[in-house]
Image: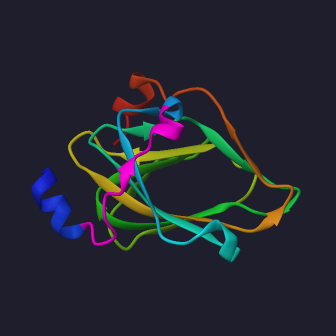
Amino acid sequence: MEEKEFNKQNVFGLGRENVQYQKYFIGKSYLNPLTDIKCGLFMANVTFEPGCRNNWHIHKAKSGGGQILICTAGEGWYKEENKEAVSLVPGKVITIPANVRHWHGAKNDSWFSHIAVEMNGEETSTEWLNPVTDEEYNNLK
């Protein structure tokens, strides 16, 4: 999907370049917070340029926790360790349990956005791991 068409679909907005977390991404991503973290449930629209993906990571929690992805525009990928990749399109919802190694991002030929919902839990944190290699990424079908 071209950027012009993507921007028509991306109703939650591009936001700002995600410089705070850029070391955990290959390519550019953008972050548009939708709620204030003080409200108890943080939600943000995350946008990935074509080919952009985040590193393998784990949303750790002693109990509860995890993340929900609500796909809103463009096309992307979600990959959980030792499972087949899932194609992401608008309307697709991914529930990521706590303590599961995974990554997500845009397809090579499309911009992509999802709303990331950080689930409440006890002793939560994100552990960022190794980048997704070009070989891993380019072999997705």
Residue occupying the point 39% across, 24% down: 134
Q: Position of residue 31 (x, y in %)?
A: 43, 54
**Segment colored magenta:** 10-22
Q: Is residue 127 visible?
A: yes
Q: Quadrant of the C terminus?
A: top left
Q: Position of residue 97 (x, y in %)?
A: 70, 60
Q: Is residue 19 magenta?
A: yes
Foreground residue among 120 and 136:
120
Residue occupying the point 45% across, 38% down: 19
Q: Is residue 11 magenta?
A: yes
> How many numbered dots are placed on residues in this image?
0
Q: Is residue 96 visible?
A: no
Q: Position of residue 22 (x, y in %)?
A: 47, 34
The quadrant in which residue 53 appears is top left
Q: Look at the picture and state if 75 lies above or below 39.
A: above
Q: Is residue 103 shown left or right of residue 14?
A: right
- How did the renderer colour the structure? rainbow
Residue occupying the point 50% across, 47% down: 84
The quadrant in which residue 74 appears is bottom left
Q: Is residue 78 shown left or right of residue 52?
A: right
Q: Position of residue 5 (x, y in %)?
A: 12, 61
Q: Is residue 20 shown left or right of residue 110?
A: right
Foreground residue among 57 and 19:
19
Residue occupying the point 89% across, 56% down: 62
Q: Look at the picture and state if 126 lies above or below 120.
A: above
Foreground residue among 69 and 7:
7
